[in-house]
Structures are given as C-alpha cells and as structure tokens.
C-alpha cells in the first residue's frame, strides 16, 4: 500500500522523536493513503510561507497480522472518546497503529463543542455522521516505522 505524509520537510527516515503529543491518535507518525489529503496537510505550511512536501512510502501490509491495531471504520462514540483521551494526554493504550477518520476543522469544531460541554455525545455523533471521513493511519511505535514503512520518494507541491 502507498502512504503519504504531508509536511514542509522531506522525511526519509520517520521517527517518533519529532512527533507531537496530544493529537488525534496520540504520538505517532501520521500518514494517509489519500494523496489529496496529504496535499491538504501541506497547505497549512504553505500559508506560513514554507514549502509543501509530500513524502511517499510503501507500507508492508503484513503489519496488520503482526501488530496491535485499532481501527475506526466510522465516526462513533468510541472514536470520539479515543480522540479526546489522546488530546488530553490520557491515552494509556499500546496500539502500534491506529486507523480512522481525521478530525479536520469541521469535525474539530464539533469535538470542541462536546469537549466544552456545549453539546452531549449523542449530538456530537449525530453531527459527525454527516461528515465524510478522510483517513489517517498513525504509526505509533518505532518498530512499526522501521520494519513496515519504506521511504520511496517525495515531491514539492
């Protein structure tokens, strides 16, 4: 499978040292199989006057049989709880890979309303079901990066 990572840098050797905490699926290297989504991730850097670079990788899908995976096929209460725990720095899970929808700006607004107790969980999920989820694949262990993700090249957009 081809995966993409949008950034302002070419990343030939991904690591967890440079990843942020308290994001959607916790500390990890975020990728997507959707080229357009990686290009959209680059746009925030371009707006700040930096370049946009999409790095491309081959992902060895045997990882799905060998590693601990959490997959969210749709926006759900479980997805929402997991994201909130990660964003609060309260994730204590040991998943190697987490796969699911992206909390983009529209989705994030709904999450913030829930987080601030302005809507309840059922209303948040009701609003989210109208959003078409993109897909992010968060590789959360260095072993996963080293063994299953292989750099193939990059391009400036």
Image: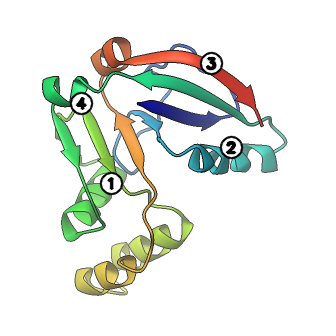
Dot 2 and dot 3 residues touching (CB under 8 Å): no
Dot 4 or dot 2: first in sequence order is 2
| Residue bearing mark 1 | 88
Question: For the residues marked 3 and 4, what is the alpha-carbon distance in whole angstroms?
Answer: 24 Å
Dot 1 or dot 4: first in sequence order is 1
Q: Residues within 10 Å of mark 3 (few under 14, many from 20)?
A: some
Question: For the residues marked 4 and 2, what is the alpha-carbon distance in whole angstroms?
Answer: 25 Å
Instruction: Specify the farthest residue to the right.
Output: 49
| Residue bearing mark 4 | 96
Q: Is residue 72 left or right of residue 101?
A: left
Q: Position of residue 29 (x, y in %)?
A: 43, 31
Against 79, residue 14 (above or below) is: above
| Residue bearing mark 2 | 42
Return the mark for residue 33: none
Q: Position of residue 128 (x, y in %)?
A: 38, 76
Query: What residue is at 34 percent from the left and 87 percent from the top?
Result: 119
Question: For the residues marked 2 and 3, what is the alpha-carbon distance in whole angstroms?
Answer: 16 Å
Q: Secondary structure at mark 1?
A: loop
Q: Secondary structure at mark 2?
A: helix
Query: What residue is at 49 percent from the left and 74 percent from the top?
Result: 109
Q: Position of residue 100 (x, y in %)?
A: 33, 52
| Residue bearing mark 3 | 153
Q: Secondary structure at mark 3?
A: strand
Indicate the colouring scheme: rainbow
Dot 1 or dot 3: first in sequence order is 1
Dot 2 or dot 1: first in sequence order is 2
Dot 2 and dot 1 residues touching (CB under 8 Å): no
Q: Residues within 10 Å of mark 1 (few under 14, many from 20)?
A: some
Question: For the residues marked 1 and 3, what is the alpha-carbon distance in whole angstroms?
Answer: 34 Å
Q: In the picture, which quadrant includes the N terminus?
A: top left
Q: Is residue 26 left or right of residue 4?
A: left
């Amino acid at each position: 499978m081809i995966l993409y990572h949008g950034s302002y840098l070419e990343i030939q050797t991904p690591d967890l040292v440079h990843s942020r905490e308290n994001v959607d699926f916790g500390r990890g290297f975020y990728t997507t199989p959707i080229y357009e989504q990686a290009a959209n991730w680059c746009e925030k850097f371009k707006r700040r006057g930096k370049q946009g670079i999409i790095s491309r990788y081959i992902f060895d899908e045997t990882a799905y049989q060998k590693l601990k995976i959490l997959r969210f096929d749709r926006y759900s209460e479980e997805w929402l709880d997991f994201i909130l725990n990660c964003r609060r720095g309260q994730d204590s899970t040991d998943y190697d890979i987490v796969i699911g929808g992206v909390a983009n700006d529209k989705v994030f607004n709904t999450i913030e309303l829930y987080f601030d107790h302005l809507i309840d969980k059922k209303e948040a999920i009701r609003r989210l079901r109208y959003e078409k989820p993109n897909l992010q694949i968060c590789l959360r262990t260095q072993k996963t990066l080293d063994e299953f993700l292989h750099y193939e090249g990059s391009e400036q957009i």
